[in-house]
Amino acid sequence: MIMPERESSKAPTIDPSADPLDPGFQDALVAGEARLSPEQALDAWHRMPIADLGRLADRRCRAIHGDSIRTYVIDRNINYTNVCTAKCTFCAFRRDQDAQDAYTLEYDELLQKIREVVAIGGTQILMQGGMNPELPLDWYVELLRSIKAEFPDLHVHAFSPPEFIEFVNFFDPEGDTLADKLRTVLRPLVEAGLDSIPGGGGEIFADAVRRKIGLGKCTAEAWLTVMRVAHEFGLNTSATMMFGHIEGVGDRIHHLELVRRWQDDAINDFAADGGGRYHAFISWPFQPDNTPLGRLKAWGDVEGDDPDAPFPGDVVGLLDGSGDRSLHREFGRRLRLAGATTYLRTQALSRLYLDNIWSIGSSWVTMGPHIGQVALRFGANDMGSVMMEENVVSSAGTAHCLNEPMICRLIRDAGFVPAQRDNDYRVLTPHFAPKGPDLEVEDWSKYRATSLHKQTESTEEGAGCGSHFGTTTGDASAIVDLTVKGD
């Protein structure tokens, strides 16, 4: 088992006068000796060609992770309920309590899902849901106990920060401050078997954007406080960012700055005592289908818009997060969706900016297998999950799906050795040639037609991305073609 190195508690230095295109400064970035300021990051975004930015991020990734291994995890994303009090305009998954297709999984249903992923070599579950006011704290505690009773070695990565904030609102726990109340809620969950916390609900931290797209969802300060308390308890977490909607580039950099700053604090305050930290950062573009936010017009598509003028989000999106919607009358009324180029640039910048975070994940689930594969050359070291099941992103119109042989082949064809990892990013099984799930496949045509398993579809074993080898079930219209050397 290969363990990830622990990041140094000493942060690299910031030189505001340095030119981000200077080769010497870039060498210092790659070595972890220099740190980008927000202004330098914005400058690099606008001035660096995408190929140069990608190469620089790739150099930094190799300095941390080496030239050989790139990882993935076998898990299942279980959305235990779609009932939610928030009314996020980017979400197509949430339902009101009385909706015809609202659901909350019974314990037996949830345990059966876990049995299926364990049967294909899964080591963890990612468990998140809507913010359902009908579920008491004891429901969650007993759920965790039931999982650990049957699967004591399974890693439970569950309950995002917005869920914890609603736990505080729903259960009114003891405590004088938000952090105190969170400790009261978190303690019984950790004792019952909670192992780590995913970074869902990060979206964009800037208040002007968050108020527009996340009605009823927690503030950035609350989100970050949840994670700080989790780190205090010794839990590791991830951080996320959803971009490509109404925000500006400055908002994305401000988001990265807050993650980096709070990570510095976690390392400085808790590392010596075995505390937790952000282990990973994953970003992805907003998926507009079936969402209220997706009905907005693109900038330049409405009479009176000047497509040559700055995008409203860039006018409001100040690097310190203080931008106000009054700075542009069309802010929040126009979209700027992010395609593959913007995604790759954003991911590369995150690798360079977040010098204190171990893993940067490729978002093939939203971008598709090909761009997910390219992302491994733009600073990503991890391909994420085989994604046996996913309900939130797929509700917004994205239904890419990969099983283990497919994800291994994508990594190998990108020039790396695929390796299964655990939630702490420890390598469990590196697949050096001539052995590996992808190298044992004789007929790749059986792997072409797949679609994500969704809660409303069949829960039979092997549905969706569940099968370890052989054909997965699905609609032939959702074809995933692999980039194959020599094809």
Image (tube, rainbow, N blue to C red):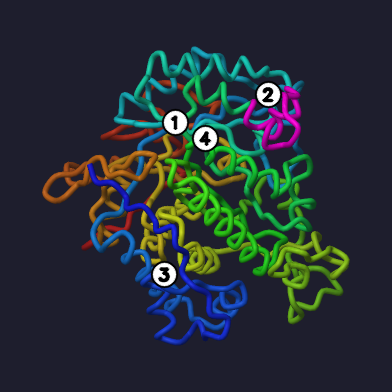
Is residue 182 shown in magenta?
yes
Query: Which mark is drawn over residue 125?
Result: 1
Query: Which mark is drawn over residue 57?
Result: 3
Query: Which mark is drawn over residue 233?
Result: 4
Q: Nearer the viewer, mark 1 or mark 2?
A: 1
Mark 1 residue crowding within 10 angstroms, few (<14) / some (14–19) / many (20+) = many
Q: Nearer the viewer, mark 3 or mark 2?
A: 3
Q: Amino acid at mark 3?
A: Ala
Q: Which residues are magenta?
A: 165-184
- Residue 67 against residue 14 in the figure, above or below: above
Placement of the C terminus among the 4 image quadrants: bottom left
Do callouts 4 and 2 mark residues in contact (Cβ within 8 Å)? no
Q: Residue at x 39, y 35 (%)?
A: 465
Do callouts 4 and 3 mark residues in contact (Cβ within 8 Å)? no
Mark 2 — residue? 102
- Residue 257 against residue 145 in the figure, above or below: below
Do callouts 1 and 4 mark residues in contact (Cβ within 8 Å)? no
Mark 3 residue crowding within 10 angstroms, few (<14) / some (14–19) / many (20+) = many
- Quadrant location of residue 201? top right
- Residue 420, position in %: x, y? 29, 42
Q: Amino acid at mark 2?
A: Ala
* Front residue of 87 and 217: 217
